[in-house]
Image (spheres, rainbow, N blue to C red):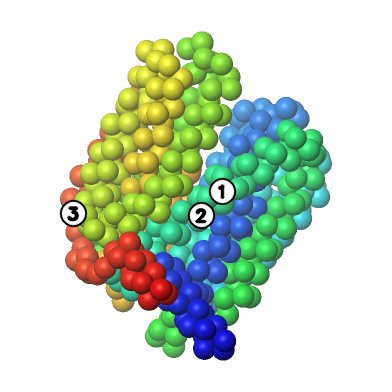
Amino acid sequence: MARLLFIREECMGNIINRIFVSPKLMLGYFGVMIFMAGEGLELNWLPDYLQHNGMTEAQTGLIYTIYGLMVAISSWFSGVLAEIFGVRRVMFIGLVLFYIGSFFFLTFGIPTNSLYWIIPTYAIRGLAYPLFAYGFLVWVAYEAPAERLGSAVGIFWFMYSGGVAVIGTKYSDIMLNYFHMQHLHLLWTALIFVTLGAIIALALSGGDTASNNNQKSEKASFAYLLNGLTILTKKPKVAMGGIVRMINTSAAYGFPVFIPALLIAQSYDKSVWLSVVFWLWMTNVAFNLLWGIIADKLGWRNVVMWFGCVGCAITTFLFYYAIISHASVLTITVIASVYGCFLAAFVPLSAIMPMLAPNEKGAAMSILNFGAGMSYFFGYFIVTLFIASIGSAGVIYIYTVLYIVAAILMIFVNVRQPSGDSVEHELSVAVKEAL
């Protein structure tokens, strides 16, 4: 009996290692997913809630612009700080900042509906989640074997997006519309999610990460923070990768600002947008995992350049013209879903960036993370700057051209990709061993 239990545990361990690289990363993945579910509770309803309570669109825009800047700054620091202090400490700092920001935001910001409280307290929350989530992404970059890095980062983005766009959003929908929970009370429950996610990722996984041990004596200085800037000149390809990552989700973040109004102007029901955006992100979540696996076979750069950049350019253009040509809701939803699929094809960038600077992975990941944070700000800023002068069509053309620019940049972001077995092969081997 003892031997059977040992064999079963060994087989289970083999399966975990084949799919999730290691048990520690597996727990980290699930911890990030639950943490981001708490972070994403208010994703689809907070701006509307603030406006219904007296905020103007301009004031709401100011709140989110500053929030986006804080996300970008924290995203940049996350990788390098993980190198200096270790991933676990940086993730813990992110958790503490979330607690602090949430306490003051929910105690003084939301109840008073005052910009003087909401802006700084929500900005602190903007600093929090990149340290936790993107700090863990550095862990993945160190822990995963090079030949499986595409799959490993694909799993990360699958869990990340699943937490924000699926679990958090659906939980809010159920609590608000079926249990009629008050918005403020719902926001307080986010602390339950982030605490549980932190326990799973930090307490249960145990051990130190590889980045904690690599050249720590050389990196234990804030001077190392300069690597997050000097690497841009030393490794121009890293800078190009950061720009591509910024372009990646900029349109996706910009769409909610003007597409709902465009749909209503074209005589669609106001509920259409919620349905369309649900399927967009559901498809994106599924393909975040699949593109990582596919890229390990077809090539990381090929997937980003052709499916990510070119695919998003085409579907962004088609999405807009399907709306103004009064296509059926099903057609618009299908195009949005295909866009969500291609949006996920940028996932291999998270594998490419550390390979561009193998001795400075933290600095390279900081640029990638900064691009991810800036994507939020950049997407919103494009709409704010151009919607009045060139209209929604002009904004769509800008997004389309940006994706083409990203494809051109990817021509130069070439990297030697290690070869290895695919996840499907690894899983089949693990199952055979288990049997």
Q: In the drawing, does residue 2 fall left or right of residue 232? A: right
| CA–CA distance in space, label 1 to label 3 | 32 Å
Would you say the residues marked 2 and 1 are in contact, meaning their CB atoms lie under 8 Å apart?
yes
**Circle 2 SS class:** helix
Q: What residue is pinned by disc 1? A: 164
Q: What residue is pinned by disc 3? A: 412
Residue at 48% x, 25% y is 259
Residue at 28% x, 49% y is 304
| Position above or below: 116 against 2 | above
| Position above or below: 133 against 1 | above
Image quarter for residue 170?
Answer: top right
| CA–CA distance in space, label 3 to label 2 | 28 Å
Q: Nearer the viewer, residue 35 or 151?
A: 151
Residue 247, percent from left and from top = 36, 43
Q: Nearer the viewer, residue 426 or 183?
A: 426
**Circle 3 SS class:** helix
Q: Nearer the viewer, mark 1 or mark 3?
A: 1
For the C terminus, the image quarter is bottom left
In the rendered structure, which disc, 1 or 3, sits on the residue that comes first in sequence?
Answer: 1
Crowd class of label 1 (few under 14; some 14 to 19; many from 20; radius 10 Å): many
Q: What residue is pinned by disc 2? A: 160
Residue 113, percent from left and from top = 77, 38
Crowd class of label 3 (few under 14; some 14 to 19; many from 20; radius 10 Å): few
For the N terminus, the image quarter is bottom right
Residue at 32% x, 37% y is 312
